[in-house]
Amino acid sequence: MNSKILSVLSVLLAVGLSSAGSSAGPGGDDIPGERAIINSHMHASSLGGDDSVYLARVIEEMDSLGIEKAVLHINEASDVDTWIRAAPGRFLAGPSFPCVKAGEGRADSCSWDQGRWPSIDWLRENFEDGTFAVMGEMYFVYAGLSPDDSRMDPYWSLAAELDIPVFVHINRGPPPNSPFRPNGCCPNFDSDLGNPALLRPVLEKYPDLRISLQHAGFPQMPMLGDIAYIEETFDLLRDYPDVYVDMTILNSVVPLPVHRAAVRQFVERGFADRIMFGTDNLDAGQILARYRSMEFLSESELRGIFYDNAARFMRLHQPEKSH
Ligand SMILES: [Zn+2]
């Protein structure tokens, strides 16, 4: 999801739903069997305000809910100082691209030294010195560009060479004229490019590449604008064990029964251990409470969604962290 497009709704949600329903104390250690939490989908976004104020609020929310680290998609080079260096050890960060012309009167989604694209040399430098840990969110749908477009070749090649996980926005959404894709957003938006099967040529070339499919789990529902590629998602998970998912924003703005049904379907298909908790900057406490309410999840499946799956995907080598 484009963070700047999210900003209005995020503010609205943050006002009314802050930490709703969560019973976790600092460190999350009052929940039996639960340790730390990783948020696998966040954006460096000041919500149009002061970055340092918003960052302080983000860290406060993370601390209050036991969220140890968050995958952070940044939008411009200055975010390295404003976000990554301002909160050492809290973010697994990397740049979003290809950047999207957002339309008249709206800020572009991101901007780099090569315009829509970060230069390979700059990326390599930041991966090698540990400033960056991920690539993405990849905005193929918004940019109207296929994952196997030749302009992506050097980026896939770099991710494979340096073993960097890549986070890709999938599915047809957000639907036109929703709060997430307002009028004027993204003249090149092409919903067909949200099909995860389009990642197959990339994975055939780089079978060990780690990819997170962002916004997975949406069912075929006319009320959602028929935005899902659910079977294509399962097919990719079956064929590539290093492909994982998050369920943003199904896990927050879509009614709980739909989210529940999606999680249950992943469990039944044998993919509970590929789901990673993520927020896309929406209310983390509310989303954690939803997962905790899913009584069909075993304790280890729940801990997997909150921490172990992301730790495995990100190769943090600390899946059994304890307090
Ligand atoms: Zn996003």
Image (spheres, grey):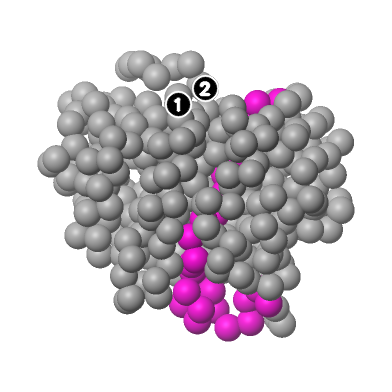
- In space, the residues marked 2 and 1 are separated at their CA atoms by 6 Å
Q: Amino acid at mark 2?
A: Arg
The correct choice, above or below, for 195 with respect to 92 in the image is: below
Q: Quadrant of residue 318?
A: top left
129 left or right of 72 in image: right
Is 180 inside the magenta-drawn segment?
A: yes
**Residue at x 78%, y 37% (from the top left corner):** 123
Residue 217: image x %, image y %? 36, 53
Question: Which quadrant of the figure contains the N terminus?
Answer: bottom right
Is 177 inside the magenta-drawn segment?
A: yes
Q: Amino acid at mark 1?
A: Ala
Which labelled disc corresponds to residue 315? 2
The correct choice, above or below, for 26 with respect to 196 in the image is: above
**Residue at x 27%, y 52% (from the top left corner):** 262
Residue 214: image x %, image y %? 48, 50
Is label 2 in contact with label 1 (beta carbons under 8 Å)?
A: yes
Q: Nearer the viewer, residue 125 or 170?
A: 170
Q: Main secondary structure of the magenta part?
A: loop
292 left or right of 192 in image: left
Residue 292: image x %, image y %? 21, 42
Magenta-tinted stretch: 162-187
- Residue underneath mark 1: 311
